[in-house]
Amino acid sequence: GENVEQHPSTLSVQEGDSAVIKCTYSDSASNYFPWYKQELGKRPQLIIDIRSNVGEKKDQRIAVTLNKTAKHFSLHITETQPEDSAVYFCAATWGSGGGADGLTFGKGTHLIIQP
Amino acid sequence: GAVVSQHPSWVICKSGTSVKIECRSLDFQATTMFWYRQFPKQSLMLMATSNEGSKATYEQGVEKDKFLINHASLTLSTLTVTSAHPEDSSFYICSARDGTSGLQYFGAGTRLSVL
């Protein structure tokens, strides 16, 4: 089955700086890679996703890059703000629509934005 | 956006009793729903895949006789934790896959505490 590794487990950055979280996956059949933001005790919220036919996707301050050859993908948050503080999870799965199988999650990164 | 309703949000029960958790897709049809479990400060782990009208598929290590899943309609899946024990205490989250977009949407989660 799929295995997703995520680093770092904790990331502390100054407000306004950029944050980068990296994930690797093991199953070359995976073709859909979402990123979720989860605040304490709440449901994961999809913040951005990328499919395997795309190398990069951007949505305002958030971007995701995918390297299929190396089987890794990264989340980039620029101009970080206090409300970006949360736990971020990467995930991988396969399916034509982007989620035919259940998601395999990374272990999560606790992002702390220092004022 | 798509809404997934999960109830109850919090349940406390005595050891040995059974607890039922409901997951509903409110504005779309979900042929597939997924059940995840999340222990404190850990990632989400897929427990099972629930397909409407057929038996659920369980991940390795998840006891199907303990975690009963029923997906009787295109908008409702239930997870019953039978003969619950303190080690079953966890945060249980469902997700529903929109058959049109393929995206997964999460419920708000159920915090189960077994005394």
Image (cartoon, grey):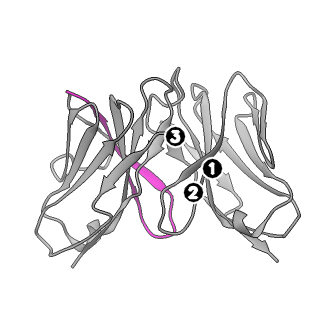
Q: Mark 2 points at which residue?
A: A107
- Measuring from the top left, give residue A15's x and y in whole percent: 84, 69
Q: Is mark 2 on a helix, strand or loop?
A: loop
Foreground mark, 1 or 3, reads: 3
Q: Mark 1 points at which residue?
A: A5
Q: B54 above or below A18?
A: above
Q: Name the residue under label 3.
A: B1
| Separation of residues labelled 1 and 2 (CA atoms) | 7 Å
To which chain does the residue with label 1 belong?
A: A
**Other residues around mark 3 within 10 Å, as few (<14) / some (14–19) / many (≥20):** few
For the point 46% across and 70% down, the residue is B40
> Marks 1 and 3: CB-CB under 8 Å?
no
- Residue B45 is one of the magenta-drawn residues: yes
Whether residue B22 sits left or right of residue A55 in the image: it is: left
Query: Which residue type does callout 1 highlight?
Result: Glu
> Which residues are the magenta region?
B36-53
> Marks 1 and 2: CB-CB under 8 Å?
yes
For the point 27% across and 61% down, the residue is B8
